Image (cartoon, rainbow, N blue to C red):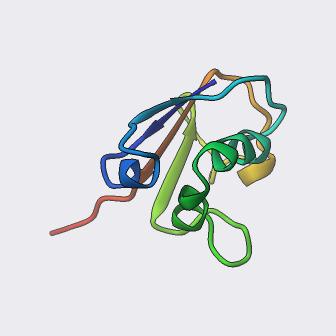
Amino acid sequence: MKVYLSGHLKQFAGGETEVSLPGSFTSVGEALGGLWSLHPALRDRVLDEQGKIRTHVNVFLGEKSVKQSDGLATPVDADELHIFNAVSGG
């Protein structure tokens, strides 16, 4: 699986915006666990104290929003995970 990170998050992944995760995963939470094993500093930037995706962070599995699906329990049915901060302004 490939994980794509926004520019802000790359600083917590050794400057990488694209991370290849070895192995296969059954859920988004499991895939993120694989990402944390490679880049542990990302965990606190993506998940809150309760282990849920932070409100200002978007996680997409392929083109599907994980927050609008089953959260971390979302079954993996794509080979790309995109993680980025929400953008707002006026």
Splitting the image into 4 quarters, where does residue 80 fall? Answer: top right
55 up-or-down from 84: above or below: below
- List the single residue furthest toward the left: 90
Tally the marks: 0
Q: Residue at x 74, y 47 (%)?
A: 33
54 up-or-down from 57: above or below: below
The x, y position of residue 30, in whole percent, is 79, 43
Q: Residue at x 48, y 59 (%)?
A: 57
Q: Quadrant of the N terminus?
A: top right
In front of the other: 62 or 25: 25
Q: Residue at x 55, y 40 (%)?
A: 60
The x, y position of residue 25, in whole percent, is 80, 30
Splitting the image into 4 quarters, where does residue 35 fall? Answer: top right
The x, y position of residue 56, in whole percent, is 45, 66
Splitting the image into 4 quarters, where does residue 47 fall? Answer: bottom right
The x, y position of residue 67, in whole percent, is 63, 54
Q: Is residue 88 left or right of residue 38?
A: left
Q: Residue at x 61, y 60 (%)?
A: 43
